[in-house]
Amino acid sequence: MTTTVNDIEHASSESCQGVSVICVYFQPSVKVELALSQITDVVQTILRILPPGTFPLNILQYDASSVPIVQLGLSGQGLTEEDLHDLGLSFIRPRLANVQGASVPLPYGGKVRQIQVDIDPNLMYSKHLSAFDVPTALNQQNLIPPARLARIGDREFIVKLNSSPPVVSTINDMPVRSRIDARHLRPVRLAVTSTVIHDRTGVLSVCRFGTDGSACISGAGNAAGRCRAILRFD
């Protein structure tokens, strides 16, 4: 990064399970817009060599005028930590991010939903399958194509394709590979060699509202924003 991004003073990084934070400090004479665009270009090249499934980096700009403005605590009766994280990420954070001058990172706390496939190596070996066959089958059978039109006679009908599983349990019925058994072509389904569960990722941060698990969103403002506009985001 130091060879492709201008005016870097120094950089530091901190990593833990599932997340990495890189802080880049610039010289006082830096052109911030140019530096951000250069970092974005470098990130796109680094993403290609990272492990599969790595999310794109989230770049946030902070300077001396970035001061804490608001911190929202999310809690609700009957809502799980997964629900609170989804509400904060998909509904509350986009409304705060639209305010001029506001810098809103991802929610803290909560739990990120994740569908996990636990593979049994012995069963995979007995069916002559490898661990790469499972993600390949999932990627090929979990698509979201646009709806199509079917013209029948003088009418047109909107046709939605069932190319994406509606519920988690139907993933077990996905065929991984077909094999010949007694001169018949029989599919080997995912439930034969693996177990699909609706779980969550590892806990990276914890927020508490009393004794219950919750999530929180922090908002910071800079010189380009107004505190009153950030607070009155409704």
Image: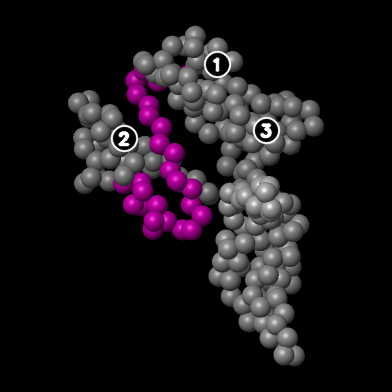
**Looking at the picture, how far across and down is residue 34, in whole percent?**
25, 33
Determine whether 50 is above or below 183 in the image.
Answer: above
User: Which residue is disc 1 drawn over?
Assistant: 233
Report the magenta residues as a range. Answer: 42-68
In the drawing, what numbered circle is on residue 189?
none
Please indicate, yes or no, whether residue 122 appears anywhere in the rendered image: no
- Snapshot quadrant of residue 210: top right
In the drawing, what numbered circle is on residue 36?
2
| Residue type beneath disc 1 | Phe
Instruction: Say which residue appears at 58% left-offset and 63% top-offset.
Output: 140
- Pointer 1 local density, CA inside 10 Å: few below 14, some 14–19, many at least 20: few
| Residue type beneath disc 3 | Leu
Q: Secondary structure at mark 3?
A: helix
- Snapshot quadrant of residue 141: bottom right
Distance from Cα at disc 1 to Cα at disc 2 = 26 Å
Circle 1 or circle 2, nearest the eye: 1
Q: Is residue 17 magenta?
A: no
Q: Secondary structure at mark 2?
A: helix
**Looking at the picture, how far across and down is residue 112, in whole percent?**
62, 43
Q: Secondary structure at mark 1?
A: loop
Query: Who comes first in sequence, dot 1 or dot 3?
Result: 3
Distance from Cα at disc 2 to Cα at disc 3 = 31 Å
Instruction: Say which residue appears at 67% left-offset and 63% top-offset.
Output: 118
In the drawing, what numbered circle is on residue 84?
3
| Residue type beneath disc 2 | Leu
> Is 127 situated left or right of 228 in this image?
right
Classified by dominant secondary structure, the portion drawn in magenta counts as loop
The residue lying furthest to the top in this view is 228
- Pointer 2 local density, CA inside 10 Å: few below 14, some 14–19, many at least 20: some
Instruction: Say which residue appears at 39% left-offset and 58% top-offset.
Output: 49
**Looking at the picture, how far across and down is residue 199, in whole percent?**
69, 50
Circle 1 or circle 3, nearest the eye: 1
